[in-house]
Image (cartoon, rainbow, N blue to C red):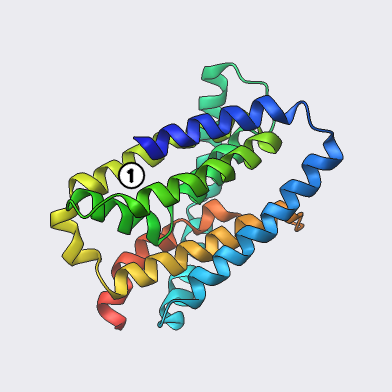
Amino acid sequence: MVNAAAVLVGGALGLALGGLIPERVRVIVFQIFGLFLVGIGLDMIAKSPNLIVVMACAILGGALGEALELGKRLESLGDLIKSALGSKNPTFTDGLISSSIMVCVGAMAIVGSFEEGLGQGRTTVYTKTLIDFFAVAVLASRLGSGVIFSSIPLLIYQGLLTMAAGALQPILAGPITDCLSATGGLMVMGIGVNMIGFKPPIPISSILPALVLALILPAFLL
């Protein structure tokens, strides 16, 4: 709940301050943060001892996502939410999808939720909360109000992990967590590359099935 609240407040702060900052300043800050995300993604990937499995998850997941036209389906869902809210922001869906991926993937979301659910403290959750606060503030200043709504999937995802920590910890321990975190790192890196201005942009939402494969393939390949 604290993490989700931080996303709400950070996103609102980014929206409020974004209009007060000159466009050229917002652009360079946005791109610098993109470089920062590339670094975070690389670090998450480098920590994995099984990069071949991560590569397999990413390639197969990306191919599956494109075959299912997952990107278009998520964009349609985002546009539906945008329409229901009456938003005129042209980057609403992009902000919602990018920020949701950024705050939900990674080892900190899993480990932090498990630690809290098992009564082992909240240090990891609070550290992630601080990072997410500044991250969504930067995203919201550039991409707008859609970023704020990433607090909803974050609350559901981490909330379920926390409540089911006892049952899920043995399943998601070790190689699966490493693979899941590294696969998420690849997606975070992709978001960063898109923020820098890579053309054509990488369809990050199409790679989402890779996270599901990261839960399955390690059991057969490791």
Q: Residue at x 50, y 72 (%)?
A: 45
Label 1 residue SS: helix
Q: Residue at x 46, y 56 (%)?
A: 208
Q: Nearer the viewer, residue 82 or 109?
A: 109
Q: Is residue 22 above or below residue 195?
A: above
Where residue 122 sits: x, y (%)?
30, 49
Q: Is residue 93 visible?
A: yes
Q: Is residue 201 visible?
A: no
Where residue 132 sits: x, y (%)?
50, 45
Where residue 83 sits: x, y (%)?
57, 21
- Where residue 106 sits, quadrant-wise, is bottom left
Decide if residue 34 is on the left or right side of residue 185.
Answer: right
Q: Quadrant of the N terminus?
A: top left
- Counting other residues with Cα less than 10 Å from the Cα at mark 1, is it few (<14), some (14-19), or many (20 or more)? some
Q: Residue furthest left?
A: 167
Decide if residue 212 is on the left or right side of residue 119.
Answer: right
Q: Residue at x 36, y 71 (%)?
A: 178
Q: Quadrant of the C terminus?
A: bottom left
Q: Nearer the viewer, residue 21 or 149?
A: 21
Q: Nearer the viewer, residue 182 or 108?
A: 108
Q: Looking at the picture, which amino acid does disc 1 mark?
A: Tyr
Where residue 135 sits: x, y (%)?
58, 45
Q: Is residue 125 above or below residue 209?
A: above
Q: Which residue is mark 1?
A: 157
- Where residue 76 sits, quadrant-wise, is top right
Q: Residue at x 51, y 59 (%)?
A: 207
